[in-house]
Every structure is written in C-alpha cells, then in structure tokens.
Image (cartoon, grey):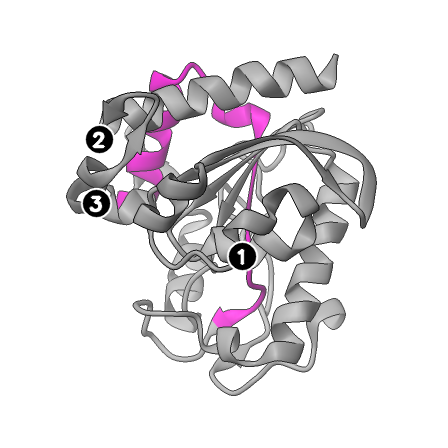
Amino acid sequence: MIEVEPYPTGVVNVPGRIAGTAFFPGGYGLWQADGPIPQDPIMILGHDFHSEVGFRESFDRGGEVVMEKGRPVMGPTWRSLVCLLKEADIDPSSCFFTNAYMGLRAGSGTTGRFPGSTDPGFVERCRAFLTLQIRTMRPRAILTLGAWVPSFIGPLSPELACWTKTTSFADIDNVGPMITDVRFPGAPDVLCAVGALTHPSLRGPNVRHRHYGGAQGHPAELQLIRDVLVHATASST
C-alpha cells in the first residue's frame, strides 16, 4: 500500500484483496464483503494480517471464513472472535475488522512481534494510516486484540496515552482496559470508547488472567465489551 511504503525487511506488500470475509488489509474488513459498509461501526483492531503463505491460502479459498455444506468454516481466531461477539450481542456485520500494521509477514511465519514493529518510520506510517481509517470509518467503538495493540494506538490520542508504555495485560488492566470519550487529533469528528481484549487465537490460556469491574477471566472481558458498548452509545448521541 502506497501510504505505508517503503516496507521494512521481513514485510511485503499485500498482492491483492481476498474476495470474502477477511480482516483488512488482506480483505475488505467486512463480515459480508459484498454487503453494505456499516455506519458508525465497531472497529476490531488486530496486530497484523498474516504471512504471505497464509494470505495466499485464504485468497485461494475465497475468504478467512468460508461456507462448506451450509456451515461456516473458520480458523481459531475467527471462531473465538465470532463466539465472543455474539455472546456480547454484537452482530459481526456491524463491525470493521482491520489491523494496526499493514503488509504481510514475508514467508510463512506468524508468531512473535510483527517484523515492521522495530522500524520507527514504518510504525509511524502505519499509525498515520490507522488514523485515516478511523477518520474514514468513524467507529463508535474500538476493540483492540492482543497485548501489543494498545501501546501502538496509545500515541494517537491524549485519552489513550496511558496505554503507550504498556507491555502486558497486567499493565493494561492496572491503568484501565477501557477508555471512554476518546478523541483523535487526526480524526477530530470521531468520539468513541476503546477497550483492550485478549487476542482470540490465544484466548484460552490468557483470558483467565484478565481483571475488570470486580470480575476475572471471561466474565471480565464480556463485561468490558458491554461497558464499551454502553459508553459508545452515549458518546454517539
């Protein structure tokens, strides 16, 4: 993508767009790629899309979520995320699914920090592009996925500055995993609530450590999402 080039070592451009359900930038970021763009969506913000190999597999299948014999087939990230959204009474079609970092991991590896996260110039270009996404999509709420995304988004808003130096969910829960009435200088017309969630692919072993509103584990994150939605509705009225 021109807006974030040049790509640092270990990161390559997305060569096309997946036709069906897929996170942006690999796909269109919509639950129904051929459906309407949601108004005032909930932005689901992941860390990075995938590897070159993973992208190609999803591209060839036609989506990260595909229908087989009338039933959706999806990997662990989507499966866990969709279950969580539905339990929180969130229709996936009301969401915009995107990532903090643009591009793909070169090769087939998908674990660990994104290679581009060590390049300050690339990080800033990705932050600028995320600001553009926020300004364009005008989300009423943002739900981050994983422990690394809050520190990425922290510098984009004075209200999120407390997340800038966080490196773990213990840090995030200590300073507060939900921030309300968030404004972005680069998107001045947007007012939203932001909540930090465990990454769906690692939810099983990690969610039990979450603390929020006097609850622990899965109930804590579920209450966090519900509170984000309450404040998001209040902010948008």
Q: Which mark is residue 79?
A: none
| Among numbered discs 1 and 3, the one appearing first in the sequence | 1
Question: Residue 15: which quarter of the image?
Answer: bottom right
| Among numbered discs 1 and 2, the one appearing first in the sequence | 1
What are the residue bounds of the magenta stretch? 75-104
- The answer to the question of whether label 1 and label 3 lie on touching residues, with beta carbons closer than 8 A, is no
Identify the residue position indicated by label 2 in the image.
217
Element type at mark 1: loop
Identify the residue position indicated by label 3 in the image.
206
Q: Is residue 106 visible?
A: yes
Question: Residue 14: which quarter of the image?
Answer: bottom right
Give coordinates of residue 36: x percent, y percent: 68, 27
| Among numbered discs 3 and 2, the one appearing first in the sequence | 3
Name the amino acid, label 1: Thr
Residue ID at (44%, 70%): 114
Question: Residue 39: which quarter of the image?
Answer: top right
Q: Which mark is residue 164?
A: 1
Question: How many numbered marks appear?
Answer: 3
Give coordinates of residue 178: x percent, y percent: 49, 32
Frontmost residue, 33 versus 189: 189
